[in-house]
Image: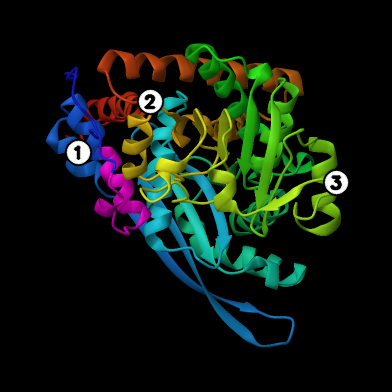
């Protein structure tokens, strides 16, 4: 495969009038096509990569506590398995769509390839507000969904994991339901499980740990001192809260954080232990003592060194990219920045560590958990952390090399690197 050097990707678009509302999958395809143009990708490979290999849509009944039955919509998108089994999380959210899940499965394909993992990309979702369910209803919903998709998943076929509003307990229910169907324990069918049933040490914090590692590497490349850096974190779930913790440990000062109810700002800095305790007690980071309450929009536009979007897709768009105050954006969330925003940020000299690299720590440690399950041999936390560090720093070095070699932005460099691996596997296997 030839790689075309010096291709201009994105130009210097600064007008917000060019941006139109598109589905996450349309955005993913645009990102793919940008990279394909920059690397002179075989058009036959591109034709295959423009769509998932399979999208399963299921409707399954759940008995509610009231005795009534509700039917829920579940989705599983399997994008590409040229490099190995499909891999990707399952999210529970009222706004889940087929197009969103398809996009996430595409991004998982690139993420696995960048990390050098023997995985393809998949993603799943259920259209539901899990906060409105009792624990019993949540368990019945989880078992119903996994039973409905059981024929297309498996430890050598497709391995789901936690995502938005799913956790280790949901994974345990998934695993148990699949094991009942299979007639024996199949711990390796999902990752992100509790330790007692085949989970891995270090999995809960892996996404944030991986992000902090690549932020540290990027700051070195850019000539910034992370020890004196200010940070804002949008989203305070697993990835966002632990990003706060790890970046604080590395010496950075986290001055603002937010969740779905809003955010808080303190120029003196926010301690992870204090904010997380407040969140557990009150259900939100809002109204934390000694801080100003701010909106999520205001947080994104703060004048900080590092911005960590750790919420949902399409947070930085053509409409607000010109007001982003950070020098470095590290995408803990999947798809938080649109292509139009990438153009504007690039024109302003803002470096973006793309999601397919920045949050690859989660899938990397999921892979380590899966390997442990397959061999029934488990590692210490320090062994897991050392392997994660090796994978993430190597991935960063390769993506940075691709960016400079092809004279493109970091996201396009990451895509070029990932697509090269996937395309080579497709060709060797005789798909094209």
Residue 185 placement (x, y as % from top left):
67, 47
Q: Check the picture and name the quadrant holding the N terminus.
A: top left
Magenta stretch contains residue 404: no
Would you name the residue on which mark 1 appears? 46
Q: Nearer the viewer, mark 1 or mark 3?
A: 3
Magenta stretch contains residue 23: yes
Residue 324 placement (x, y as % from top left):
48, 39
Judging depth in this view, the residue of 241 and 141 nearest the camera is 241
Q: Is residue 316 above or below residue 395?
A: below
Residue under the point 65% across and 51% down: 175
Would you name the residue on which mark 2 appears? 410
Q: Check the picture and name the quadrant holding the C terminus.
A: top left
**Which secondary structure lies at badge 2?**
helix
Judging depth in this view, the residue of 161 and 344 nearest the camera is 344
Q: Give the range drawn in magenta.
A: 15-32
The answer to whether any part of residue 52 appears in the image is no
Judging depth in this view, the residue of 302 and 139 nearest the camera is 302
Labels in figure, total: 3
**Which secondary structure lies at badge 3?**
helix
Residue under the point 40% across and 41% down: 322
Would you name the residue on which mark 3 appears? 277
Q: Is residue 154 left or right of residue 22?
A: right
């Amino acid at each position: 495969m030839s790689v075309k050097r010096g291709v201009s990707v994105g130009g210097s678009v600064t007008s917000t009038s060019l941006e139109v509302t598109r589905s996450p999958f349309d955005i993913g395809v645009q990102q793919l096509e940008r990279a394909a143009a920059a690397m002179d990708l075989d058009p036959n490979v591109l034709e295959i990569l423009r769509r998932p290999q399979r999208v399963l849509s299921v409707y399954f009944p759940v008995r509610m506590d009231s005795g009534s039955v509700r039917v829920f919509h579940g989705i599983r998108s399997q994008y590409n398995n040229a490099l190995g089994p499909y891999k990707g999380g399952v999210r529970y959210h009222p706004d889940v769509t087929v197009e969103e899940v398809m996009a996430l499965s595409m991004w998982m394909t690139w993420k696995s390839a960048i990390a050098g993992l023997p995985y393809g990309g998949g993603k799943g979702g259920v259209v539901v507000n899990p906060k409105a369910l009792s624990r019993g209803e949540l368990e019945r919903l989880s078992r119903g969904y996994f039973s409905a998709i059981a024929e297309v998943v498996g430890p050598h076929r497709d391995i789901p994991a936690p995502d938005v509003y799913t956790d280790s307990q949901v994974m345990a229910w998934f695993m148990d339901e699949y094991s009942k169907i299979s007639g024996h324990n199949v711990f390796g069918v999902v990752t992100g499980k509790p330790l007692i049933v085949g989970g891995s040490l270090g999995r809960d914090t892996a996404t944030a740990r991986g992000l902090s590692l690549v932020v540290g590497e990027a700051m070195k490349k850019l000539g910034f001192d992370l020890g004196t850096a200010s940070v804002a974190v949008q989203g305070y779930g697993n990835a966002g809260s632990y990003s706060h913790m790890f970046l604080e440990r590395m010496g950075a000062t986290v001055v603002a954080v937010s969740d779905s109810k809003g955010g808080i700002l303190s120029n003196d800095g926010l301690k992870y232990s204090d904010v997380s305790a407040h969140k557990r007690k009150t259900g939100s980071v809002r109204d934390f003592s000694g801080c100003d309450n701010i909106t999520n929009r205001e947080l994104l536009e703060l004048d900080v060194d590092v911005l960590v979007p750790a919420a949902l897709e399409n947070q930085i768009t053509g409409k607000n990219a010109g007001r982003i105050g950070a020098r470095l954006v590290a995408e803990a969330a999947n798809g938080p920045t649109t292509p139009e925003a990438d153009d504007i940020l690039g024109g302003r000299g803002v470096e973006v560590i793309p999601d397919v690299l920045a949050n690859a720590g989660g899938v990397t440690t999921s892979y380590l958990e899966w390997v442990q399950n397959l061999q029934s041999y488990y590692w210490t936390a320090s062994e897991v952390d050392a392997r994660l560090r090796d994978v993430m720093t190597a991935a960063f070095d390769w993506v940075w090399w691709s960016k400079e070699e092809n004279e493109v932005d970091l996201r396009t460099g990451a895509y070029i690197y990932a697509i090269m691996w996937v395309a080579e596997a497709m060709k060797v296997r005789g798909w094209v």
